Amino acid sequence: MKYRYLFASDMDFTLLMPGEDVTEENKKAIRLLRENGVAFTLATGRTFYLVRKFAASLDVDVPCITSNGGSLYDPKKFDEVYSVNIDETVARDVFEMLLRRDIDFAGYSGEGIFFGPRNGRRDFFDKYNEGLKEEEKAPLYDFSLDMKPFPKFSKILVVGADEETKAILRGNKDLECTMSTGVLMDLTAPGASKGNALLKLAEMLEIPEENVFAAGDNDNDLSMLKAAPHSIAMGNSSDEIKACCEYVTTNCEENGLAKAVYDFILPRVRPSS
């Protein structure tokens, strides 16, 4: 289908609450978007292995932005169509430091998710896999520096790092560092961001930049909200996010995404009578 507009939504605390499904109200709004020529996609820090079932339930038919912009993933073909990976030497150095400092981490690769020894986030991934067919499950592995060949990582998720470690990572010019919550730091390659991936996707779909919408709530959405000409902040967003957006909707728990669709997006995309 040829679309005239593109709308990218963050997932956690924007489209849905973590660990929950998309509400029927939000699903209804998304279907209405598609009927009005708007391509809907997900833009998330999650690996594409944790996006599949949500993309299927929403019938997303354009690539999803995953790994904080490190990857564009086609949910219909189950394949990456574009990726920006962290340099292997840089990734090894980061992993070595995290192991030495006993800091929890997970590496996102096209091959699967690789967990550090502490495995603090493993339960979240196991819960996602519950009830899925074997071929639909996210592949989960233990990380080792001795893996051969060494996987290509589009993102490294650092969990609960101390301030000194965060400062070292932020100072690394070979990494893009963003915080997705108070304890989660996302590391990607330079230039890999939701914002750059959003514009790349619009180009792939031949949608003019001025017809691009985005919604988010947190710091890792900032690049996307600044890149999109039409930006939406959730009611539960930080003041910084709200200040940079064109429209502020209600909280995620109140179906703020659906409200933004009805009150902000549809009036701008429907042909005037």
Image (cartoon, rainbow, N blue to C red):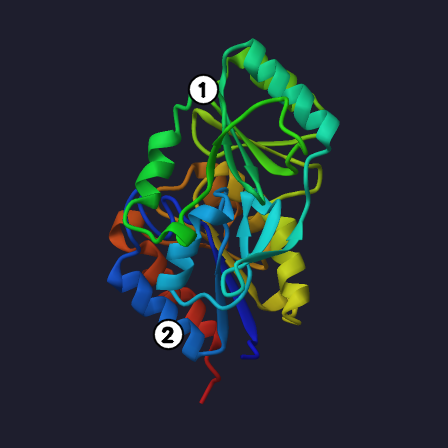
Residue 206, located in which quarter of the rendered image? bottom right
Give the residue furthest to the bottom. Answer: 273
Callout 1: helix, strand or loop?
loop
Q: Name the residue under label 1.
A: 160
Q: Which residue is at the front of the view, 18 or 77?
A: 77
Horizontal side of residue 35 vs 111, given as left or right: left
Q: Please, is residue 103 above or below residue 220 in the view?
A: above
| Front: mark 2 or 1 | 1
Q: Please, is residue 11 above or below residue 175 in the view?
A: below
Q: Please, is residue 36 above or below residue 123 in the view?
A: below
Q: Tell me the tag on residue 18.
A: none
Going from the N terminus, do you reach mark 2 or mark 1 first?
Answer: 2
Residue 54 visible (yes or no): yes
- Three-letter amino acid code at disc 2? Leu
Question: What residue appears at the point 37 percent right and 74 percent down from the top-left corner?
Answer: 32
Question: What residue appears at the point 40 percent right and 48 percent down from the top-left corner?
Answer: 137
Residue 18 visible (yes or no): no
Q: Please, is residue 37 above or below residue 252 in the view?
A: below
Q: Mark 2 points at which residue?
A: 32
Horizontal side of residue 51 vs 146, given as left or right: left
Looking at the picture, how far across and down is residue 226, in whole percent? 59, 49
For the C terminus, the quadrant is bottom left
Residue 128, located in which quarter of the rendered image? top left
- Three-letter amino acid code at disc 1? Gly
Total marks in image: 2
Looking at the picture, how far across and down is residue 39, in whole percent? 50, 69
Looking at the picture, how far across and down is residue 70, in whole percent? 62, 44
